[in-house]
Image (cartoon, helix red, strand yellow):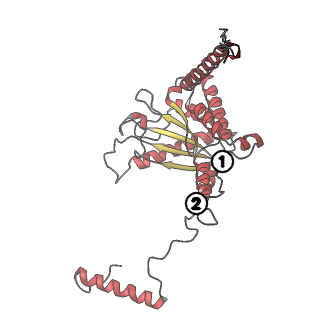
Amino acid sequence: MSQSNKRPIIIRRKKVIHQHHGGAWKIALADFMTALMALFLVLWILSVASDEQRQGVAEYFSTPLVTAITGGDRSGSTSAIPGGGPDPTHSDGERARLDVRQLTRPSMQQRRFFLDVQERIESAIELDPELRQLRNQMRFDLTSEGLRIQLLDTEQRPMFALGSDRVEPYMRSLLRTIAPLLNELPNDLSISGHTDSVAYAGGYRGYSNWELSSDRANASRRELVAGGLDPAQLLRVSGFADRASLPDTSSDDPVNRRIELLVLLPEVADAIRNPGVLSGSAMPSLMPESEEGEETAGTEQLFENLQQELGGDQPAAE
């Protein structure tokens, strides 16, 4: 074969041109730094926010989107199976749990209402130089029953005379200042008295902390009514003696001598007025189901056996 028939071998080499890769990485870094800044900002806000504000944020994000857009009930179910109970009445399922949650946690609207009540009371106290000194002896907090206003005792400035239900002048002025503000509310009120554990000489047989706590609650009620409170607005007046001490305090701490005013939630007030029976019926009889004659005979036989065990046929005391 001649050399002219040989085909030349051609090698093609790809020429690589180094170009600038652009600024895409800068955009990604900027997005990352923005997200970090937002995270740190949220963490800082949560660290300086109050418990009520954090609870409000939590409830806001726990609300389903459809409910938030339509303005429906916040307690709406997000479950794919509505109700969730084993029976048609849903007495032991998701709906029952939601009902209990509604009864034991104030809604956001109720929280704002109670906070407004607190601000109005604090503003009225600040206007009076004498009452302004009692601000440290007042506590406001939200409970499962409503807004609780606590008037606390101290050794330097007791609310009542020692061992008595006689109201001190500044306590009287404080109650009569609060009364018109409470009277403007549609809610019912509850008053409870509390004492420390320092007992009377006669113990619980004579005048005791039970009577003292009840008398002090009633004395506070009289001062509120004298200040303009409608008596029909009071739903409950009670005394707890020393059985409900404040958390992280000893039972003999003077701070446990206090009066608690509760601005009740409407559903709590309804439950107090109409206490329901769990089963919806009366308490079942302790005796087995039988005919009336048989039940009476069984009771008599039981009584005779008891007499014999106690020492013979002795006549019963009248």
- Give the residue drawn at x 51%, y 35%: 151
Q: Residue furthest right?
A: 70
Q: Quadrant of residue 27?
A: top right
Residue at position x 44%, y 86% from top? 295
Q: Secondary structure at mark 1?
A: loop
Q: Is residue 169 above or below residue 95?
A: above
Q: Is residue 62 above or below residue 284?
A: above
Is residue 33 shown above or below 285? above
- Image depth: mark 2 or mark 1 in front: 1
Q: Position of residue 38 (x, y in %)?
A: 61, 22
Please state which amino acid type lies under the numbered disc 2. Pro
Disc 2: which residue: 275
Q: Say few, some or many: other residues with alpha carbon within 10 Å of mark 1 (under 14 / 14 to 19 / 20 or more).
A: some
Q: Nearer the viewer, residue 179 or 226?
A: 179
Q: Quadrant of residue 87?
A: bottom right
Name the quadrant containing residue 62: top right
Q: Residue at x 48, y 46 (%)?
A: 215
**Residue 91's spot in the image, x, y percent?**
59, 62
**Residue appearing at x 52%, y 23% in the figure:** 133
Q: Is residue 40 left or right of residue 21?
A: left
The one nearer the camera, 274 or 130, is 274
The residue tagged 1 is 75
Residue closer to the observer: 170 or 256: 256
Query: Which amino acid, by three-letter code, is at mark 1?
Result: Ser
Q: Are marks 2 and 1 in contact (CB under 8 Å)?
A: no
Which mark is on residue 37? none
Q: Secondary structure at mark 2?
A: loop
- 118 w.r.t. 41: above or below: below
| Residue 82, position as x, y percentages in the image | 66, 57
